[in-house]
């Protein structure tokens, strides 16, 4: 960290009279990849990337570099100053943020996770590969771990830093023409249930053999946490970003305080002490705050950075992305309030429906009402009266997400961490009238 502080001071000196902001992103990580029941790759990387933003007299310029020796720092900042002279003035450009007290967050750094060895990762891969070989299955996937550090500083006296560790076990199993998948990300490697994940992927693959094609149409669906999170991420980003809201491009425009979604649905963004914690400051070094986005289906508020807050005549909630940002502020630490009972109870309560393990190739079609498309993957089955009747060939969906999450019938009580934009904690959902527009024929 001292090296970063020293680099920032040198950058500030080279910036001369311009306002100067430094974002330093440090990552030290390793990954073990396996396929066909053998390890195919083991890699590690250690990097520091700098982004420097310069402001002067209504103009701004940004430069990126990854060398921090004296000559490289001087050369990079001088290039930025030359670019700055040629920029057009922006009447809406805000000065850099002044330092503000930052809240205390959860400890997300775990020494054991940071220090995992290639042997440890290889042993976890071998556990799955051995079981798959014995059963005539094929395993592939990744196990990664590392440390990330973020520093935001400027020459107005702001200096904010955050460190956290990460680990993630992601596995896919093939059983002839059946596929199964499971994944679990964590800050503390001891929280990852390796045996359960392996068994889940293997059992899903076995249950997905010889899939059948079904007709497109509207079905009751049980979305496992990752599948639900893929959809809710888009709902959060394109519905609750302050800039999109100010521009009238969000589905919540004119709907604050109104019940627009299911009364079972409550979502908060809380990087401080929520179920999906993260760094306690945004990418301008401003304190993040806890924001309830949806409460029992009622739309509460968007999130803001300094720019969108000024336009909306309100206060920033501390959700800035690196500036300048075409998207504006977005929620990055979503936590969905769990419901009642385990996933198996959601499935048992489904008279006729489709269980979806995972989506992929999800894309936004219409921003205003968050209409999306994508495909099922790695474990899609037809269920009747709580039992598997047959596996289903992958389906494409085309669905308005505002409508979909207005049709929530039940939410499981076991929220888990999932991969998303930022961090997210999500339970499983049962939705009615979910639109599958076509079969993908495989």
Image (tube, helix red, strand yellow):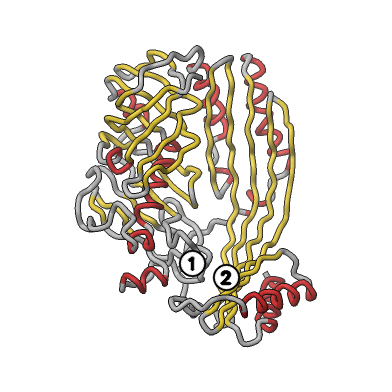
For residue 37, above or below residue 105: above
Q: Would residue 27 appear left or right of 358 to someone viewing this image?
A: right
Q: Which mark is residue 361?
A: none
User: Residue 197, position in %: x, y?
Assistant: 53, 31
Q: Residue at x 54, y 46 (%)?
A: 186
Q: Which residue is the extreme one toward the bottom?
A: 17
Work out how far the residue at label 1 is from the one at label 2, CA to CA, in angstroms.
9 Å
**Label 2: few (<14), some or many (≥20) within 10 Å?**
many
Determine which residue is flagged by label 2: 152
Q: Residue at x 68, y 84 (%)?
A: 13
Above or below, 2 against 176 in this view is below
Which residue is painted at 67% across and 80% down in the image?
9
The quadrant the N terminus occupies is bottom right
Secondary structure state at the residue bearing disc 1: loop
Say how many tags the image has. 2
Q: Residue sitting at 43 percent across and 63 percent down?
A: 319
Q: Quadrant of residue 6?
A: bottom right
Q: Which mark is residue 281?
A: 1
Q: Is residue 166 left or right of residue 237?
A: right
Query: Could you tell me if the residues under marks 1 and 2 are in contact, i.e. CB atoms within 8 Å?
Result: yes
* 272 displayed left or right of 345: right
Picture coordinates of residue 221, whole percent (x, y): 34, 28
Q: Position of residue 174 (x, y in %)?
A: 59, 21
Q: Secondary structure at mark 2?
A: strand
């Amino acid at each position: 960290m001292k090296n970063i502080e020293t680099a920032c001071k040198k950058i500030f000196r080279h910036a001369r009279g311009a306002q100067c902001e430094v974002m330093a992103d440090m990552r030290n990580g390793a990954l073990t990849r396996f396929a066909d029941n053998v390890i195919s790759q083991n890699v590690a990387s250690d990097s520091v990337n700098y982004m420097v933003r310069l402001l002067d007299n209504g103009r701004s310029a940004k430069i990126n570099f990854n060398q921090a020796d004296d000559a490289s720092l001087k050369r990079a900042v001088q290039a930025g100053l030359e670019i700055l002279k040629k920029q057009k003035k922006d009447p809406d450009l805000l000065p850099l943020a002044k330092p503000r007290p930052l809240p205390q967050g959860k400890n997300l750094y775990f020494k054991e996770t940071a220090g995992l060895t290639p042997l440890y990762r290889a042993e976890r891969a071998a556990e799955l590969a051995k079981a798959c070989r014995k059963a005539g299955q094929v395993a592939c996937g990744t196990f990664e771990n590392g440390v990330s550090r973020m520093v935001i500083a400027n020459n107005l006296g702001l200096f904010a830093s955050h460190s956290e560790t990460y680990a993630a076990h992601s596995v896919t199993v093939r059983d002839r023409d059946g596929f199964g998948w499971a994944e679990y990300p964590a800050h503390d490697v001891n929280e990852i249930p390796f045996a359960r994940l392996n068994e889940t992927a293997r059992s899903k693959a076995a249950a997905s053999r010889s899939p059948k094609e079904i007709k497109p149409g509207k079905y009751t669906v049980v979305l496992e946490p990752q599948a639900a999170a893929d959809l809710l991420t888009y709902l959060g980003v394109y519905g609750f970003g302050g800039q999109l809201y100010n521009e009238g491009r969000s589905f919540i425009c004119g709907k604050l305080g109104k019940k627009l979604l299911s009364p079972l649905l409550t979502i908060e963004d809380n990087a401080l002490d929520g179920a999906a914690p993260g760094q306690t400051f945004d990418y301008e070094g401003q304190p993040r705050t806890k924001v309830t986005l949806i409460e029992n289906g009622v739309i509460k508020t968007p999130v803001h950075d300094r720019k969108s807050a000024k336009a909306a005549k309100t206060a920033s909630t501390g959700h800035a992305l690196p500036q300048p940002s075409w998207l504006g502020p977005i929620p990055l630490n979503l936590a969905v309030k769990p419901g009642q009972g385990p996933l198996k109870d959601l499935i048992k309560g489904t008279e006729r429906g489709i269980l979806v393990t995972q989506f992929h190739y999800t894309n936004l079609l219409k921003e205003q009402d968050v209409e999306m498309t994508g495909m099922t993957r790695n474990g899609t089955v037809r269920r009747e009266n709580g039992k598997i009747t047959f596996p289903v060939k992958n389906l494409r969906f085309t669905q308005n997400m505002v409508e979909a999450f207005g049709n929530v019938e039940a939410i499981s009580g076991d929220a888990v961490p999932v991969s998303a934009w930022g961090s997210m904690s999500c339970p499983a959902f049962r939705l009615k009238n979910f639109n599958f527009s076509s079969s993908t024929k495989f």
